[in-house]
Amino acid sequence: MDTGDTAWVLASAALVLLMTPGLALFYGGMVRAKSVLNMMMMSFGALALISVLWVLYGYSMAFGNDVGAGLVGSPFEFFGLSKLLGTTPVDGGNLFVATQLVGSIPAFAFVAFQAVFAIITVALISGAIADRARFGPWMVFAGVWATIVYFPVAHWVFAFNGAQSEKGGWIANTLKAIDFAGGTAVHINAGAAGLALALVLGKRRGFGRDPMRPHNLTLVMAGAGLLWFGWFGFNAGSALSANGQAAEVWVTTMVATGAAALGWLATERIRDGHATSLGAASGVVAGLVAITPSCSSVTPVGAIFVGAIAGVVCALAVGLKYKLGYDDSLDVVGVHLVGGLWGTLAVGFFASAAATAGVDGLFYGGGVDQLWRQAVGAVAVLLYSFILTVVIGTVIQKTMGFRIKEEDEVSGIDSIEHAETAYDFASLGGSGGASIAGQAHAEARNTEGVRA
């Protein structure tokens, strides 16, 4: 066991955990004032539920010994994690060395790090169904989806032979697609699920007709900042060691994100005549998404290209929902699905053997060998997630009623589902408070928002 590696992975796990509250702020600011608490609760609900499921059987399904030709790990191998317990006291009992290791870190450090990936993947989906999903059915969906979709896909992508168990998943070991930190397992997976749920639940009242503006861009910017901060744990922590690879990944993550923000802002400026704070925040997230699978395989200059292209492509992709007629409330499809697809395929184009992954892509003389592997992995995850999410979402809609009633959507999902409101204008007192409350009520009824 290496204490430096252990400290880095545990710190990285804490950084990634912070990303889910950051996502709650990011999503919460983009919805209308009458929906912000429900939006944030879906992230916090996922954090609570997936934490429990991960310990019970999720980790075992993802990293247990394979029981299905690389498709899923045994849910009973590490059930409850008791098998991973054990330390040996050394140095007179002042230091406890773990007896179960993954590489140079305790198995429990690896459990913790992978747990927060599972949590935020589920939370990401919620942005596609903002303003119209009941909280109880969402929690049921989160548990079922994590079990049937995320845990198996994590096994495909992250379970390398011999790392935790003897035999792992097919994408990592047979296909040998490169996905350093989760472009397929996290972003394509969540993006495809978001698209499927948006189709199952249908459009918001007034979609495509009424403006649906974010109610608090300050929250959006703060959330994007926390996501950028936490993402260094997400990507650089995936080295599972405090080493040169972690340092390289840190830099490629930083520069790709900056390039993507610039690309998004330039697209807005050319297309709309102005650059927006919402565009800056969205560009940051798009760049983080795109560099996630490729951060270990591209040079810093290559990362600039990956990020800049992601910023432009995702800025254009968010408008597809109006042309194609699906209501992806907070652009989970445009940012996470499209960004994840581009980032995964970018490995096949921009990978350089000079980086730690040691593979050359098409632009570095490697031909299409790595590109087809990336494409197969991306399409497989997309189809698996989309099809199963349609089935899960439809069953919940038919049995429990996933979507809130139209009259409740108009009056505000926060007050109906949680008996709360985010902003208590009445507490301001006096006629001014009443006036503000009346204005807020009118806005809640009449403003149906769109991303600029």
Image: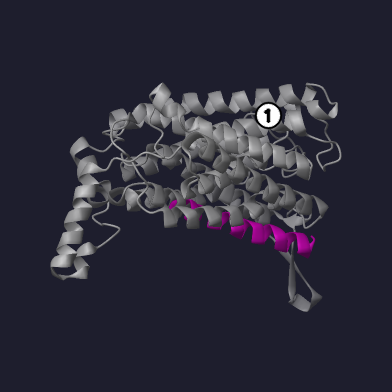
Residue on which the image places disc 1 = 345
Left or right: where 161 falls relative to 68: right
Quadrant of residue 62 in the image?
top right
Residue 78 horizontal/vertical position (percent): 62, 46
In the image, which residues are magenta?
1-24
SS state under label 1: helix
Q: State the scheme by which the image is colored.
A: one colour
Q: Main secondary structure of the magenta part?
A: helix
Residue at 38% across / 54% down in the picture? 216
Image point (67%, 52%), residue name: 110
Is 47 located above or below residue 72 in the figure?
below
Q: Position of residue 227 (x, y in %)?
A: 55, 53
Amino acid marked by disc 1: Leu
Residue at 50% x, 45% y is 275
Residue 294 visible at all: no
In the rendered structure, does residue 16 fall within the stretch colored magenta? yes
Q: Quadrant of residue 452?
A: top left
Would residue 87 appear left or right of 385 to someone viewing this image?
A: right
Q: Residue furthest left?
A: 431
